[in-house]
Image (cartoon, rainbow, N blue to C red):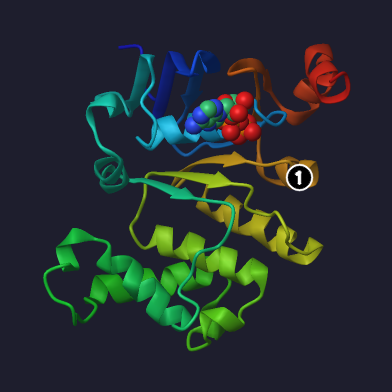
Amino acid sequence: DTTHGRILYLEDVHVSFDGFKAINGLNLDIAPGELRCIIGPNGAGKTTMMDIITGKTRPDRGTVFFGSTIDLLHYSEPEIAALGIGRKFQKPTVFEELSVFENLELALAADKRVWSSLRFSLTGEQKDRLAEVLHTIHLSDALTRRAGDLSHGQKQWLEIGMLLMQEPKLLLLDEPVAGMTDEETERTAELFLRLKGRHSLMVVEHDMHFIRAISEKVTVLCDGSVLAEGTLDQVQADERVIEVYLGR
Ligand code: ADP
């Protein structure tokens, strides 16, 4: 079984847009509980890769497995979300007029088990989860605050919290610290280290200080496939990586 011990497995994935190869023989392997950073120049295929994993884009060919048994190419975008793959886009999209608590509560309503009633009350288990998520995202003291009044960083954390309410197995995050202050970035690193182990994470980032703080393994994408993989020090010392960052 070639997918043993993997939460995510991509092999020889290809996608073309009007003849342009955006993803070109991509291979990727993420272990359960791993926090993997993805870097690469603009146009490398990072967004397209996440679109493939979440079912937004269908590859022309290749293998995309979630765990050792689930062939993601057989599932739709909402089905993939329900399987436990959460995605956060770069801009925070919280409900500004609602409180922190209400935003997290509403995130549970995306869970089909509570769809049946518009007014629902949280079970004890859900209350515990909400308290734990609030702690994880550094917002325990901001329960009743209007989400629109939070700082940019806090909104990003709240949106991560909304994903966590659905207990995802794998989280895909696009530039989570873009626009954050240094202090917020540091606290986000803490937050991610808390999530690691319990969840698998794939983080697309440009901030090298942040990457150094959170990740053991970095994958460098370029021209739709993996150019290099290793620790941040290893990939930063790789001449091919230096060339794509400096030579273009
Ligand atoms: P990254 O996120 O690393 O910047 P993308 O995945 O957004 O890279 O894009 C990879 C390449 O594919 C780029 O050259 C981009 O212009 C092209 N591309 C992405 N999506 C489409 C699309 N829907 N139609 C045409 N070209 C696309």
Label 1: few (<14), some or many (≥20) within 10 Å? some
**Residue 128 visible at all:** no
Q: Quadrant of ligand 1?
A: top right
The x, y position of residue 104, in whole percent, is: 39, 72
- Which residue is rendered at x = 61% and y = 17% of the image? 226
Above or below, comparing residue 182 to residue 18 in the picture: below
Image quadrant holding the C terminus, namely: top right
- Asked whether 194 or 206 is in front, the reply is 206
Residue tagged by mark 1?
Answer: 207
Q: Amino acid at mark 1?
A: Asp
> Dividing the picture into quarters, in which one does residue 177 lie?
bottom right
Q: Quadrant of the N terminus?
A: top left
* 26 relative to 180, above or below: above
The residue located at (27%, 62%) in the rendering is 110
Residue lying at 41% horizontally and 28% vertically, measured from the top left: 8
Residue 214 location (% of width, % of height)? 67, 45
